[in-house]
Image: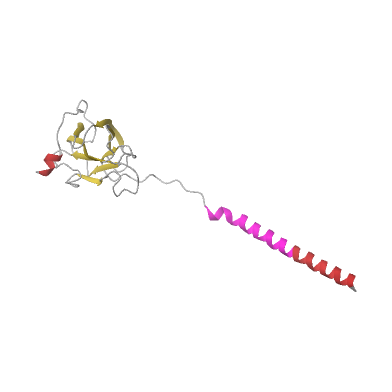
């Protein structure tokens, strides 16, 4: 009697193991069939169009707790900077205060224009505050132009300036664009032209 019970228990265990293994194999097959659909391949998309026609960007070292301000002026328009963030042509889209209220850890400012009016443009930098107390502060400023919605933006100017003390305002460059938005040959220079004082008038 005991031998029969023993064999009955063993056959029940074998059947249980077989059912478990079949269920596990079925689950693995189901996972393998679903894997390609869980994370579909990314499709290539066109890059997002840039929102402006003339783009001026300013960068300085991210580790420095300093507030460098970007000032721009379009032909016949008011200067645009931290105290006047919009005019008829330019808008200051990002006013970076260094590490104050900054969750991105990037020291970066940018201005975009609506349209590309012909004439002289001025780009200035102003060291508003330097809590890092490190000098000089190297700053890189670049200008790009997008002549039509279907064309990509093309960088036309770039320079590096060293800011040596608080409240210093430097002219990065002055340049002219023609009515097609092309850089006028021989028009680039950096003769100083203060913009902050003009914005207060």
Q: Quadrant of residue 77?
A: top left
Say above or below: 11 vs 115: below
Q: Is residue 28 magenta?
A: yes
State which quarter of the image contains the C terminus.
Answer: top left
Say above or below: 2 vs 88: below
Residue found at x 42% / y 46%: 45
User: Which residue occupies the extreme bottom position in the image?
Assistant: 1
Q: With 196 as the anchor, is 100 left or right in this view?
A: right
Q: Nearer the viewer, residue 189 or 129?
A: 129
Is there any visible trace of residue 192 in the rendered image? yes
User: Magenta residues, as a range?
Assistant: 18-39
Residue 43, image x and y in percent?
A: 47, 48
Is there any visible trace of residue 177 in the rendered image? no
Residue found at x 84% / y 70%: 8
Q: Is residue 110 magenta?
A: no
User: Which residue occupies the extreme left position in the image?
Assistant: 201
Q: Quadrant of residue 113?
A: top left
Q: Nearer the viewer, residue 123 or 118?
A: 123
Number of marks: 0
Say above or below: 33 vs 136: below
Q: With 78 as the anchor, is 30 left or right in this view?
A: right
Say above or below: 117 vs 29: above
Q: Quadrant of residue 191?
A: top left
Q: Nearer the viewer, residue 138 or 190?
A: 138
Residue 10, image x and y in percent?
A: 82, 66
State which quarter of the image contains the N terminus.
Answer: bottom right
Q: With 53 as the anchor, is 34 left or right in this view?
A: right
Residue 60, image x and y in percent?
A: 30, 37
Q: Tell me the chief SS of the magenta region.
A: helix
Q: Nearer the viewer, residue 44 or 19?
A: 19
Residue 91, image x and y in percent?
A: 22, 46
């Amino acid at each position: 009697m005991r031998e029969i019970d023993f064999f009955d228990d063993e056959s029940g265990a074998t059947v249980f193991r077989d059912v478990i293994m079949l269920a596990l194999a079925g689950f693995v097959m189901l996972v393998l069939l679903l894997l390609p659909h869980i994370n579909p391949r990314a499709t290539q998309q066109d890059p997002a169009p840039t929102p402006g026609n003339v783009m001026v960007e300013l960068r300085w070292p991210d580790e420095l707790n300093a507030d460098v301000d970007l000032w721009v002026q379009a032909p016949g328009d008011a200067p645009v900077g931290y105290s006047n963030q919009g005019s008829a042509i330019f808008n200051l889209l990002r006013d970076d205060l260094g590490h104050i209220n900054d969750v991105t850890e990037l020291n970066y400012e940018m201005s975009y224009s609506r349209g590309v009016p012909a004439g002289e443009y001025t780009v200035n930098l102003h060291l508003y505050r330097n809590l890092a107390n490190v000098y000089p502060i190297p700053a890189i400023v670049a200008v790009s132009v997008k002549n039509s919605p279907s064309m990509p933006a093309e960088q036309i100017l770039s320079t590096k300036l060293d800011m040596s003390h608080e409240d210093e305002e430097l002219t990065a460059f002055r340049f002219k664009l023609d009515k097609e938005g092309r850089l006028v040959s021989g028009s680039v220079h950096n003769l100083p032209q203060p913009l902050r004082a003009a914005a207060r008038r």
